[in-house]
Image (tube, rainbow, N blue to C red):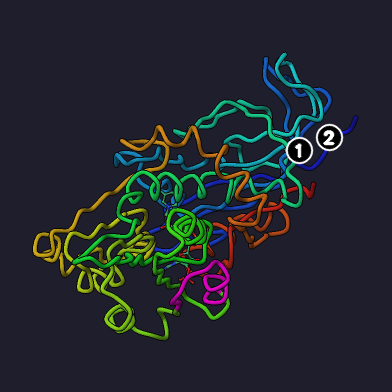
Amino acid sequence: MPKVKNGAVYYVKEPTGHIVPGEHVKYVEEEIDLENVPLGGGVLLKTLFLSSDPYLIYRMRDPSIPMFCPPILIGDVVDNAGVGRVLRSDDPNFEEGDLVYAYLEFREYHVYPGKISHMFKFPLTKIERLPNLPLSVYVGTLGMPGTTAYQGLKGFAGTALQPKEVNGKTVQPTLFVSGGAGPVGTFVIEYARQINPCVKIIASAGSAKKVDIMRSCGADVVFNYKEERTFDVLRREGPIDIYWDNVAGPVLDDALLNFNRDGLIIACGAISQASGADSAVRHFEEIFQRNLSVKGFIVYTGETAHLCGGFHAEAVPLALAGKITSREHRYAGLREAPRALADLHHGANTGKAVVVVHDE
Ligand SMILES: NC(=O)c1ccc[n+]([C@@H]2O[C@H](COP(=O)([O-])OP(=O)(O)OC[C@H]3O[C@@H](n4cnc5c(N)ncnc54)[C@H](OP(=O)(O)O)[C@@H]3O)[C@@H](O)[C@H]2O)c1
């Protein structure tokens, strides 16, 4: 069989601010002989879907800087969560046609395991098609982003989300979610409702369409932080008891000034700072003055990591019942992957950013 085109996305230059497609990450066309490429005990995969996630910018750094995730080295192919189909197998656990989830190289086809450096180097895992859900749900709502929301909310906020008795009255907590329209944010909104249907949820994101999404997920108060000041909304609708922080920066500062005593901050992400912006927190003193707790975490790790094992058992039925919903921003073809990596940091994705390498 003749060789076939095998597109790949390489990391070629460290970004000093935003990721620029073609400058920092580059699509290159190579070839592969699908029939004869040696498998070395592994499997040959056809890549179907690849995930673009905000944290990948942290991997594009000076490799001497220690961080929670390993660096990608200049000249290496980008790797991240993905879904593929087995074309050939040397591994007795897999056969042609199996659908699998793993951390994959950003290539149209590749032999697994290849040169993947990621800390979440899960074993190749067989997956099943779920009714009415695309296979790409395994990199979004039922993948790492959904697990993040589940682990953080269940692990840290299970008690804080419950109503309290104050002077003989039942008082419902107020939760604020920033970055509320992405795969982490929408899961947080919908799962918080599952934990306590009466919790008041305030959610923010950066476009009218995203505001509609957060509303449809059941948030009580939704706003576009680019058009309305977060401080004003929280002053009007708060004070807040729990802040799920996906963005940090000025939004975190506004939240700090609008907390009830004994509140909880779940520090999940800091995307406003990820492309090099000044990360100073101006109102840090509110943490001791209001007796706040801050729980930061990296998915699959730390004191709540044990919860991840129960994620699918709880989340799949919720997703099948439409109680946890998902939406995707699809990029057609691996050639579009550099744009998918960059877009997250400009808010240009509406929904989970998924690169469709080969359609199902
Ligand atoms: N702790 C963990 O283990 C873990 C795991 C997964 C994800 N995370 C974090 O969770 C957060 C959400 O992830 P996701 O996958 O659901 O991403 P996402 O919402 O699909 O995409 C990121 C969104 O962040 C927003 N954003 C970009 N720059 C911003 C800025 N300067 N200020 C405010 N918002 C900005 C954009 O939406 P707008 O239009 O609203 O600006 C963008 O669409 C990220 O911070 C990510 O790093 C953490």
Q: In screen coordinates, is 19 left or right of 248?
A: right
218 in relation to 25, above or below: below
Question: Number of callouts in the render?
Answer: 2
Q: Which residue is mark 1?
A: 31
Q: Observer-nearest residue: 19 or 171?
A: 171
Position in image of residue 60 (x %, y %) = 43, 48
Q: Could you tell me which quadrant the N terminus lies in?
A: top right
Using the image, tell me which numbered label, if any, was put on residue 233.
Answer: none
First along the sequence among labels 1 and 2: 2
Whole-percent x, y for residue 139 in the image: 60, 46
Which residues make up the magenta segment? 210-222
Question: Real-space Cα distance between discs 1 and 2?
Answer: 6 Å
Q: Which percent across, then down, holds residue 67?
A: 32, 41
Name the quadrant containing residue 201. Answer: bottom left
Residue 135 drawn above or below residue 264: above
Image point (51%, 59%), residue name: 190
Residue 348 relative to residue 59: left or right: right
Three-letter code for the amino acid on which mark 2 is drawn? Lys
Q: Which residue is mark 2?
A: 3
Q: Amino acid at mark 1?
A: Glu
211 w.r.t. 55: above or below: below
Question: Quick check: is 279 in the magenta stretch?
Answer: no
Residue lying at 13% horizontally and 59% vertically, measured from the top left:
291
Whether residue 211 is in magenta: the answer is yes
Residue drawn at x 68%, y 55% as measured from the top left:
335
Task: Residue at 20%, 68% (x, y): give it.
Answer: 260
> In which image quadrant can residue 223 be found?
bottom left
Q: Dot 1, how many residues are within 10 Å of its Cα: few (below 14), some (14-19), or many (20+)? A: some
